[in-house]
Amino acid sequence: MGSGYRGDTGSWPKNGEIDVLENVNGRSQLSATLHCGTAPGGNCNEYNGMTSGLASCTGCLTDFHTYSAVIDRTTTDEQIRWYLDGRQVWQVSESQVGVSTWNAAVHHGFYLAFDLAIGGSFPDAVCGCTSPGADTSSGGTLALDKVTVSTSTGTVPAPMTDPAVPSGHSTVKVTGSQGNWALTVNGAPYQVKGITWGPANSTAEAHIRELKAMGVNTLRTWGTDAGSKPLLDTAAAHGLKVVNGFWLNQGADYVKDTAYMDSTLDQIKQWVTTYKDHPGVLMWDVGNEVVLTTQDHTYDGSTVEQERVAYAKYVERVTQAIHAIDPDHPVTSTDAWTGAWAYYKSYTPSLDLLAVNSYGSVCNVRNDWVSGGYTKPYIITESGESGEWEVPNDANGVPTEPTDVQKRDAYLSNWACITGHQGVALGATVFHYGTENDFGGVWYNTVPAGWRRLSFYSVAKDYGGNAGGNTPPVITDMTLSNTASVPAGSTFDITAKATDPDGDLIRYQLLYCAKYAGGGTGFNQVDFTQTGDGRFTATAPKALGVYKVYVYAYDGHGNVGIETRSFRVVAPQVQGTDVALGKPTTASSYQATGDGAPYPASNATDGKWTTRWATDWSDPQWIRVDLGQVTAIKHIQLGWESAYGKAYRVETSNDDSTWTTVWSTSTGSGGVDDFDVTASGRYVRVEITQRGTAYGDSLYEFGVYA
């Protein structure tokens, strides 16, 4: 912990915290983290910090191991490295957080803190629960064999410094004639070697050196406002430029909504006036994918075609206004479809160049340009691996995500097609320099959570950068033992052997995504056991539906390989007869109106996992089935929808008056609850005393087995 934290707890995380966390929630895993900067967010992505993420630590639950952190100040780009038994598991460099943030976090003394901790936001995120729980007990022992602190001396290198923001106006022009165009900056040729920008503008100093090392000279944004200045300043200081976007609402009525168009134009004019003399400006980009997405909306009295024409005319109006304020920077407009160019050709003649977002079909753009008879050059404003809309579905109906290797190769082949259209294609801003680590982040980002992918190094190769020679592990032949019918809460096997081209130690992590099971695009930790190198036994989610499982392979040098497959979770089969099937079922309430309603109690005993009972949004609730006669019961299966009961009890009765509790919980988590009971009765009731969500309670199936 940074020494300044003593006596001033408000200095966290600015004063730095260098963490080693092992065996979180009893998992044989390890994470290494530098906390620094400001929270939340900031240059160090707080509250997560600059972290390796949890990854496998074989034997860490049972044996002593040597955990080390080294602060290396022997190079200008200082570095902290973490080791497990002498093998590197993580690193953070000064250039990744910025000079001032690093100096505040590292250039001072530290003190050591050893904790055997219980509860907190970090373990909560790992378990998807609130800790400590009922099964958590204190009284554990923290055992340390040896602690060593050492220093060495040597030649002090020149410190890293931030260059000044240059002054002076730049002039950017599209020069040349049909088929022989070029982009120039202050008279010098300029090929756009760019990438779309994802992090907060205020954190630009934490990323700009990495981008420059990739060979990137241009960043593209989708919006320009008061918050754009930090990015423009940092880019200009390091010799990069920015394609400044202006967002135009997709679905706006460009035929009739004059108030929206007028106010938006006024804002655009304001920010062009503000930044037109900034040396970081390369060009202005008006709108994003509006022409194509017009088909996804309905309009009052106008057709899609009329809206597209009206939009193109509005872009012309905006373009003329920008030119009147700033004649020294080109204007373009981006769409997701080269068919949009026909509208610009007819109705937006003042554009200086065309632009399009194109992924798996980017190599067709040249032919589209030729066949369209266009008379202006273009840039590609997004490109990369094939998108969800371009790939076939797998057996579970999920788009087949390209492998890491396929993504790597796509960036190389796409750039070859772009540069092959010489004199017309003036470069690209490929997609995406983003740090989100979720469904879309893994599909498209070159640096999810700051970890470098194979695609990161492809972009560096395309642009002639020098991003370092240590590259990510490569996962091959990822397989699941069951993809079609994994019983809820059961285990299945995953194999995803990785090799590292540099011989680095590979550590693994597994994550689930419930996007196709009615959840969001975020990730959840997997309860798994590593059974060998690249071999795992994982516990399936309790809730039914199609999931994706992701295997991460970390090399300890900031790189990661990621592969993913889908699998379907189904209800576990129960031995015996469901004696509740089709029997009279009543409830405290049911949802009679709304989307898909009614949801009567009888839906829970119809044997169909496509129908459900749903209650009013209040506590308590109950559902009761009449078995017709006193029956011996050995098992209950409750299949919850996403609105589930957190606290409930199962009761039986012979007379519908006197009830006996046979099972109860206060920590229900939804999905499929399966449990054995030893009971008998004619009536079986689930009494729900607390909902697990803000909604009501909802059951697909209420199975009672004899």
Image (spheres, grey):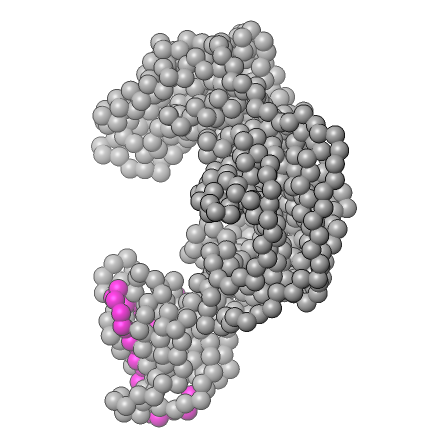
Q: Residue furthest front?
A: 7
- State which region is magenta: 604-633
Identified at 37% across, 69% down, the residue is 646
Left or right of 300, for residue 112: right
Q: Position of residue 138 (x, y in %)?
A: 52, 70
Up the image or down, 666 lies above or below 635; here it is above
Left or right of 470, for residue 238: left
The image quadrant of residue 482 is bottom right
Q: Position of residue 301 (x, y in %)?
A: 22, 32
> Considering depth in this image, is 198 or 123 the residue closer to the camera?
123
The image quadrant of residue 190 is top right
Q: Position of residue 321 (x, y in %)?
A: 33, 13
Up the image or down, 49 lies above or below 345; here it is below
State the quadrant of the C terminus: bottom left
> Considering depth in this image, is 65 or 130 the residue closer to the camera?
65
Q: So how many labels did they put on this image?
A: 0
Q: Is residue 147 visible in this depiction of the protein?
A: yes
Identified at 58% across, 9% down, the residue is 188
Identified at 62% across, 55% down, the residue is 30
Up the image or down, 91 lies above or below 540; here it is above
Q: Position of residue 337 (x, y in %)?
A: 46, 29
Up the image or down, 113 lies above or below 167; here it is below
Magenta segment includes 630: yes
Identified at 46% across, 26% down, the residue is 230
Q: Is residue 376 visible in this depiction of the protein?
A: no
> Considering depth in this image, is 391 or 355 the residue closer to the camera?
355
Q: Residue furthest right?
A: 503
Magenta segment includes 355: no
